[in-house]
Image: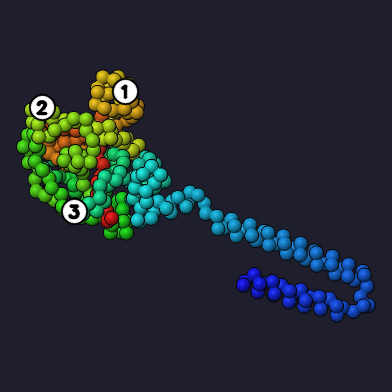
Amino acid sequence: MKKKIIAIMLTLTMCVGLSACGSTSDGDSANDRDETVTERRENTSDESDDQTESDIQIADAEEPDEEESIAEEERTPDGYINDEGYYVFGWYEQDGDESNGPEPIEWEILDQNENGTLLVSRYVLDRVAYDNDGDTYDTWETCSLREWLNNDFYNTAFDDEMKSRINTVTLVNEDNKKFGTPGGNDTNDKIFCLSLSEILRYYSFDSWDPTDAIGNDYGYSQALITPATYYASHRRLVGTHFITDEEYKNLLSERNYSDDCVGECGASWWLRSPGEFRSQACIVNFKGMASDNVNLPTNSNAPGGCGVRPALYINK
């Protein structure tokens, strides 16, 4: 129907045009007609040039700069999943060049449950002591690392819209199963470190039965080898190490690691679980090994400090 209407309108327009042409005086000379045609052609050419230039300007204005487009995408409060499958959410200094601003944080997606979606940072983001005062015993509830995560890091990495998506959850802080070191009271946190029980739940280990206090009291997981950012690694981070071919052949190959781990630079990072003694907390080391008694003094701040992989729950 639309095509018929358009065809009728075109026909009427042509008829009107022909009628107008027919009323032209016979006294018009051929030269006058030639001049008129030439003049129309010149005007049409000028208009065409102007239109072409205008179209180019509009096209240029509408074509977004690729870097600006990516930057806008990275700064969406809802976050997004990138091509590697990591969730991008928040910003933190990572490349060591503070003049270009903080970089987007990539998060590993661990689980979805009644608390929301559980995320843990892809990289070790900073070097922080578990507790600044190692002379006294501190559980997760009272340690300075918990304070740093829920204040300094929280306010640095997220804007108000992002904060509205981060859930406050109740964390169970278990005692050390091997040594009985108390884990302290349960806590309500927005940002936290994973516990020994949680990494056992979300990662595959070659061997580790935490209920066997006599036999296997440690485990290895290649998925837990975590590199540190340039920023973190240059803040006197302890336990950063490149995995050698010899280490792979003599140890890690027997732990079901693939040879892809050779050359990886892993860093040690805190768990919130208590260690063997009351002044220690558990860690995951650069090889991806964790245990009830693989730990560091809670005031490990000199000559280096252990790394931090923040974890959080966001709205589904």
Decide if residue 98 is on the left or right side of residue 191: right
**Numbered label attached to residue 244:** 1
How far from the left and from the top, in percent, is residue 224?
A: 26, 35
From mark 1 to mark 3, how far is it between C-alphas?
Answer: 40 Å
Label 1 secondary element: loop
- Which tag, 3 or 2, sits closer to the chain's start? 3
The residue lying at 17 percent from left, 39 percent from top is 196
Residue 39 visible in the displayed image? yes
Q: Quadrant of the C terminus?
A: bottom left
Residue 305 visible in the displayed image? no
- Which tag, 1 or 3, sits closer to the chain's start? 3
Label 3 secondary element: strand
Category of crowding for the residue at label 2, using alpha-carbon neighbours closer than 10 angstroms: few (below 14), some (14–19), many (at least 20): few
Q: Is residue 196 above or below residue 247?
A: below
**Numbered label attached to residue 215:** 2
Label 2 secondary element: loop
For badge 3, the amino acid type reads Val
The residue lying at 29 percent from left, 20 percent from top is 249
The residue lying at 13 percent from left, 28 percent from top is 216
- Which tag, 1 or 2, sits closer to the chain's start? 2
**Marks 3,2: beta carbons within 8 A:** no
**Numbered label attached to residue 169:** 3
How far from the left and from the top, in percent, is residue 46?
A: 75, 63
How far from the left and from the top, in percent, is residue 231?
A: 33, 39
14 or 52, nearer to the observer? 14
What coloring was used for the rendering?
A: rainbow
Camera-side mark, 3 or 2: 2
For badge 1, the amino acid type reads Thr
The residue lying at 11 percent from left, 49 percent from top is 186
From mark 3 to mark 2, how far is it between C-alphas?
Answer: 34 Å
